[in-house]
Amino acid sequence: MKKDNHLVVSALGEDRPGIVNELAKCCADYQCNIVDSRMTLLGGEFAIVMMLSGPWDAIAKLESALPQVARKLDLLMHIKQTSQRGVARTITYSVNVVSMDHPGIVHEIANFFSLRRINIEDLQTSTYCAPHTGTQMFNLTMTINLPTDTHLATLREDFMIFCDDRNLDAMIEPVR
């Protein structure tokens, strides 16, 4: 059985129609699969991160072709070879936090989990205006991987105390 190689590509550029189409076409042209991806708009900029897989020769050809695609699409692009992530013995949890927006929220939450050696697998944040008041609100959603020896009740209690001290509305629950 052939072993696939992997490539991570991140790109950023002014948003316009056709970027996803061109990147996906390039991957298909070189017989590479988009295994995982995140695409979003940040202000007027389009951002993408994707992991591609394929045989070593296809990945090598794609890696050589991508700088020309980046120039054509006027994208800042970073390309890095990687490997498939190993299977870890962890429990996956979802964390949701909502509060009035202010600087430092992400750092404080990331620090809470980092001090406990808990890996953040995925994190998304956004802001919005509260209905009626127009107050700038902050929303965070993330996925964390807990080591199997984590005492869940203690972690949950510590996190809720941490959030209460900072006036953050939060929820932490297993991913189903």
Image (cartoon, rainbow, N blue to C red):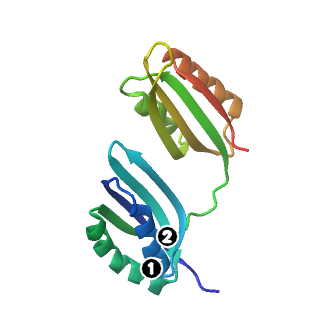
In this orientation, which residue lies closer to the viewer: 89 or 33? 33
On screen, 71 above or below 136?
Answer: below
Which x, y percent locates residue 58?
46, 83
Which x, y percent locates residue 154?
66, 28
Q: Residue at x 38, y 23 (%)?
A: 102
Q: Is residue 94 visible?
A: yes
Q: Residues within 10 Å of mark 1 (few under 14, many from 20)?
A: many
On screen, 20 above or below 65?
Answer: above
SS at badge 1: helix
Label 2 with label 1: CB-CB less than 8 Å: yes
Count numbered badges in the picture: 2
Give the CA separation, mark 2 to mark 1. Answer: 8 Å
**Mark 1, residue position:** 59
Say the numbered circle drawn on residue 129: none
Q: Residue at x 51, y 18 (%)?
A: 131
Which amino acid does the dot numbered 1 rest on?
Ile
Q: Residue at x 45, y 73 (%)?
A: 25
Q: Is residue 155 visible?
A: no
Q: Quadrant of the N terminus?
A: bottom right
Residue 174, picture quadrant: top right
Say the numbered circle drawn on residue 52: 2
SS at badge 2: strand
Which x, y percent locates residue 55?
52, 83
Image position of 36 (left or right of 17): right
Q: Residues within 10 Å of mark 2 (few under 14, many from 20)?
A: many
